[in-house]
Amino acid sequence: MAVVHHTTLTPTKLELLAAWLPRQPWYRGEADGPADPRKAGGFRLDDPAGEVGIEFMVVTEGSVAYHVPMTYRGAALDGAEHALIGTCEHGLLGKRWIYDGTQDPVLRAQLAALLRGEAVAQAQSESDTPDLTVVGELATDATAGLPLDFVRVPQAGSAAPDATGTVTAGWTLADGTAARGVLVRV
């Protein structure tokens, strides 16, 4: 199981996202300055090789929620410069490269494993703690070749009636209300 280190990150993930979010085509805020994201929920998946951190983070900015899958690596991912969110200094592990996880093959493989029931979602901020509120459902046994649609602006209570599969999870809205919706469609 992946270990969640309670240490410093400089800059923090939220600071990196403040600069990165406004450059994304699905961002709903003002694109002329930094965003002000607030951590609202999410979960982790384990990399069986223990090399890549995998996190599905939901942040809010005002009344809008954003789903930002991220991977954390100890070295740059070849060919993924376009997906780099930024780098930071981890208090224990040193320099980390943080990527938009939608472009990372390790995240995609573990997400497919979750949908097949071969991986268990983990709590976002605790080591070795399953998050049983995350539900991955797939209407078929095969995930190879199925497109993954990452819902970047999830809606509370959303459903995906035409999807072959979904991953649903919860987050907290800016006003403190609990929300739940689809984060990934297959």
Image (cartoon, helix red, strand yellow):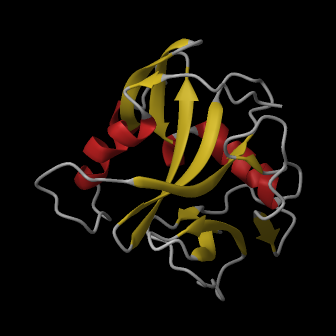
The answer, for residue 169, to whether it is visible in the render is yes
Task: Please tell me which residue lies in front, 167 or 130.
Answer: 130
Q: Farthest residue to the front: give it.
A: 176
Q: Does 92 appear above or below 143?
A: above
Q: What residue is shown at x 26% (from left), y 42% (from top)? A: 19
Q: Position of residue 127 (x, y in %)?
A: 78, 34
Q: Quadrant of the N terminus?
A: top right
Outermost residue on the left side: it is 32
Residue at 35% from the left image edge and 37% from the top image edge: 16
Q: Quadrant of residue 53?
A: top right
Q: Which quadrant, please, contains the C terminus?
A: bottom right
159 up-or-down from 83: above or below: below
- State whether residue 78 appears in this view: no
Horizontal side, residue 82 vs residue 1: left or right: left
Decide which of 159, 57 is in the foreground and name it: 57
Residue 42, horizontal then vertical, whole percent: 62, 55
What residue is drawn where x is 84% and y is 60%?
132
Q: Residue 113: x percent and y percent?
A: 80, 50
Nearer to the camera, 7 or 152: 7
